[in-house]
Image (tube, rainbow, N blue to C red):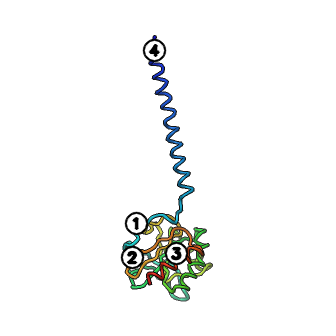
Amino acid sequence: MQDNKAESREAEGRSLTWIVAPLVVFVALAGLFMFALERGDPTKLPSTLIGKPVPQTTFPPVEGLTQGEKPVPGFSSADLASGRVTVVNFWASWCAPCTDEHPLLTELGKRTGVPIYGVNYKDQAPNARRFLGRHGNPFAAVGTDTNGRNAIEWGVYGMPETFIVNGRGEIVYKHVGPITAESLEKKLLPVIEKNK
């Protein structure tokens, strides 16, 4: 009789463990996610490319994109090792934050004189042309990344993202998300000035 009671308590203990263990794991994971959401800042995502040469990539031109009568060229990683600081901005016509940051890219170019290279990400040429026609073209060259493969090589997480490249073609800064007036003044302009 006592053996039956002991076995019964043991079975109840095992059943309770199978109920409580998943609950404990769930609560722990939920707490971790809440902590990450409150503390997480996507602009502070690490980049393993800082201090390294830009990935060997080629961005073909946006089909039919012109500036005046001249076609706007695409570019390659070799163009970014020209001896002067450059900025590379990944954007798309379907990206609302890209629209918000666009005037600041124009201001960045005017204030620093550095060439800005645009990468039109997973977009269609007519949409890219329409976007630049509506908002202006601050880019010295505009390449396409229609399948997103080059963005993966660059470690891009989402649109928009901006990279500052020194004259040797090395990435010295990565900005995740749209450029704001504050990030322009406190982050991008100082990094550009330091690397000129």
Quadrant position of residue 135 = bottom right
Work out whether mark 2 precedes mark 3 in sequence or the reverse, and give the earlier one: 2
Q: Viewer-proximal residue, 135 or 112?
A: 112
Q: Position of residue 110 (x, y in %)?
A: 55, 86
Q: Residue at x 54, y 68 (%)?
A: 177
Dot label at residue 4: 4
Dot label at residue 48: 1
Mark 4 and mark 2 in contact? Answer it, CB < 8 Å: no
Q: Give the foreground label among 1 and 3.
A: 3
Work out whether mark 3 precedes mark 4 in sequence or the reverse, and give the earlier one: 4
Residue named by callout 2: 170
Question: How much space separates mark 3 and mark 4, taking CA atoms?
Answer: 71 Å
Dot label at residue 187: 3
Characterize the local packing of mark 1: few (<14), some (14-19) or many (20 or more) Cα atoms within 10 angstroms: few
Mark 3 and mark 4 in contact? Answer it, CB < 8 Å: no
**Element on which disc 4 rests:** helix
